[in-house]
Amino acid sequence: MLSKKIIDFLLSLNLPLVLPNGIEVLYPFSDKETTDVIKQFYNKFYKENTGRSMIIGINPGRFGGGVTGIPFTDPIRLENECGIKNNWQKKQELSSLFIYDMIDAYGGVKEFYSKFYITSVSPLGFIKSGINLNYYDDKILKESIKPFVVDCLKIQTAWGFRTDVAFCMGEGENYKFLTKLNEVHSMFERIIPLPHPRYIMQYKLKKKKEYIQKYLEALGKK
């Protein structure tokens, strides 16, 4: 089953490099509740392979995927939208809020997750001084993480996801990084950039509905 492949992949994640000074890995999978939750989530929405497209973010944050183990899914959305109860503090992540508003506009979690699989360039997140760190914000990390990123993407594409097109969340550094890797390793025929949810929620909140529509059009939902 597809769900088993995803779960096994997540639980076996290991960053095989020494991190630059002061940077720590967000590794939620050693927590029993996280392990239980990802099993529930992927067995609920990803049992069968339905030819999904990949949507690729940057790396998990400490209030979303860095807690739940599920990309762009905070404890609130996990319980209210996905129907998976959890005991975590119900802290909101802005990116998760946008993604689930978009998913709702798409047709709901069952419809959306039957067509898309969300992951990240780095499926493990990073923090520095207790604050979220994007992999590309540290030059040493950005270079050293490349083999890990390529290995992870190749493992995931081998599960049968579409490779004619992938979507990249982040029109700037994340898109540039992913595009350059793809030029070398030919994982996807085409990568379509999308504005990052965090950028939308932080700087373009008044135009959120317009950005949701932009996502829907790009993802083929008119």
Image (tube, rainbow, N blue to C red):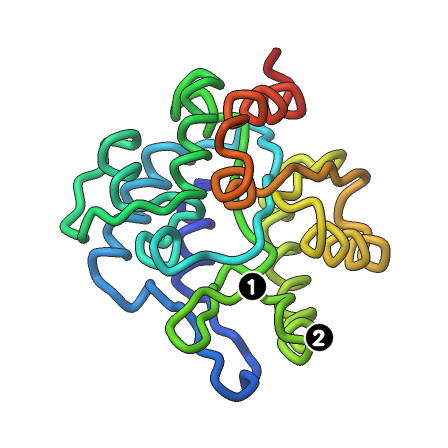
To which residue does mark 1 refer?
Answer: 134
Q: Residue at x 61, y 11 (%)?
A: 222
**156, above or below 20, in the image:** above
Q: Residue at x 18, y 53 (%)?
A: 88
Nearer the N terminus, badge 1 or badge 2?
A: 1
**Around disc 1, counting alpha carbons within 10 Å, would you say few (fewer than 14), some (14 to 19), or many (20 or more)?**
many
Q: Secondary structure at mark 2?
A: helix
Whole-Å distance between the Cαs marked 1 and 2? 13 Å
Q: Are marks 1 and 2 in contact (CB under 8 Å)?
A: no
Residue 155 is left or right of residue 125, and the answer is right
Q: Position of residue 181 (x, y in %)?
A: 78, 59
Q: Residue at x 37, y 41 (%)?
A: 42
Give amino acid for label 2: Glu
Q: Secondary structure at mark 1?
A: loop
Q: Is residue 160 visible?
A: no
Q: Position of residue 188 (x, y in %)?
A: 76, 43
Q: Position of residue 100 (x, y in %)?
A: 40, 31
Hey, which quadrant is residue 85 in on the image? top left
Q: Residue at x 45, y 43 (%)?
A: 95
Residue lying farthest to the left in this orientation: 87
Residue lying farthest to the right in this orientation: 183
Q: Position of residue 185 (x, y in %)?
A: 80, 57
Please identify the quadrant where the N terminus is shown: top left
Give amino acid for label 1: Asn
Q: Nearer the viewer, residue 67 or 12?
A: 67
Q: Is residue 42 visible?
A: yes
To which residue does mark 2 refer?
Answer: 143
Hey, which quadrant is residue 152 in on the image? bottom right
Indicate which label's residue lies in the foreground, 1 or 2. Answer: 1
Q: Nearer the viewer, residue 177 or 208?
A: 208
